Amino acid sequence: MLVLVLLGMVVFSVLTARNLSAYVKENLTVTVMLGDNTTVNQAHLLCRDLYHRPYSRNIDYISKEQAQKEQCEAMGSDPSEFLGFNPFVATLEIQLKSDYVSRDSMKWIAKELRSNPKVIDVAYQEDLMDKVNDNLRKVNLILLALAVLLTCVSFSLINNTVRLSVYSRRFIIHTMKLVGASWGFIRWPFMRQTIVVGLIAAVLACGALAGCAYGLYTFEPGIVAILTWKELAITGAAVFIFGIVITALCSYFSVNRFLKMTAGEIYKI
């Protein structure tokens, strides 16, 4: 059960890392600055047009008055009092879909946005975008390497446990072979027992992982943006598959090892 909890945490981490990557990318903002002669209706029409673009996930329209109010609250003063006019422009805050948050995609997206006569400029944090992509790529590689390592360790631990169980009954295997039992007939009870143990361990491991997920949700309800039922279902299915397949394979190879031995070899080990 503990080994399957470990494997489940690895699968869980890999899946949530993908969601975390998408969540971080989709919260990066592209600011589209509109000209002073752009009316509210024209801005809304532009928003509706941009919503149909494949890269748009969410668009917020910020009018000149709203921008002035927000900046006054942030700075504690009103620039229009000594300038005599509102220096801020209306903007569109565009949040992109995660697949389009990259340097190459942003080049043609910015070019397309600037081609609109109502747009005077497009601003986005290119360095921050590159840094986020690089860091997420490194995290994904580390998690992948850790997943491979822990899978090998888990397989080794389960294999040793099953081999010890079969080793304690090696003389029964040899006796059944002497009376003419087929290899499949001898092998099946061992495989059935280990599969049942694997299923029980998988149920307990899924219960432990579900408890951890509920604890995370209780501590931080916002985790649902990254942790969804899809990830939980895939993790649970992976735990059951690992529990059945690994134990069955280990039992199969362990029993075969003793089936191939002669009486002298069995007594010597």
Image (cartoon, rainbow, N blue to C red):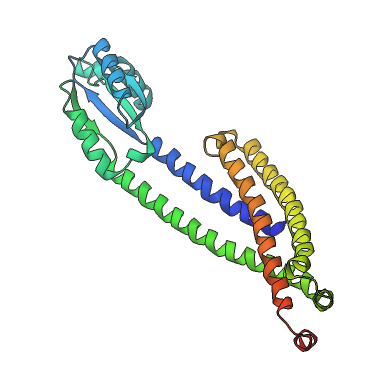
The quadrant in which the N terminus is found is bottom right
Q: Residue at x 16, y 27 (%)?
A: 115
Q: Is residue 102 left or right of residue 247?
A: left
On screen, 74 above or below 8? above
Q: Give the answer, above or below, for where 179 lies relative to 252.
A: below
60 on left or right of 104: right
Q: Is residue 124 above or below residue 141?
A: above
User: Which of these two is toward me, 97 or 247?
Assistant: 247
Where residue 61 sits: x, y (%)? 33, 20
Q: Position of residue 107 (x, y in %)?
A: 22, 39
* Residue beneath the point at 20% across and 31% down: 112
Could you tell whether 45 is left or right of 181 in the image? left
Is 91 positioned to the left or the right of 2 in the image?
Answer: left
Q: Residue at x 65, y 58 (%)?
A: 245
Task: Residue 30: give x, y in percent of width and height.
Answer: 30, 32
Is any atom of residue 263 visible in this view? Answer: yes
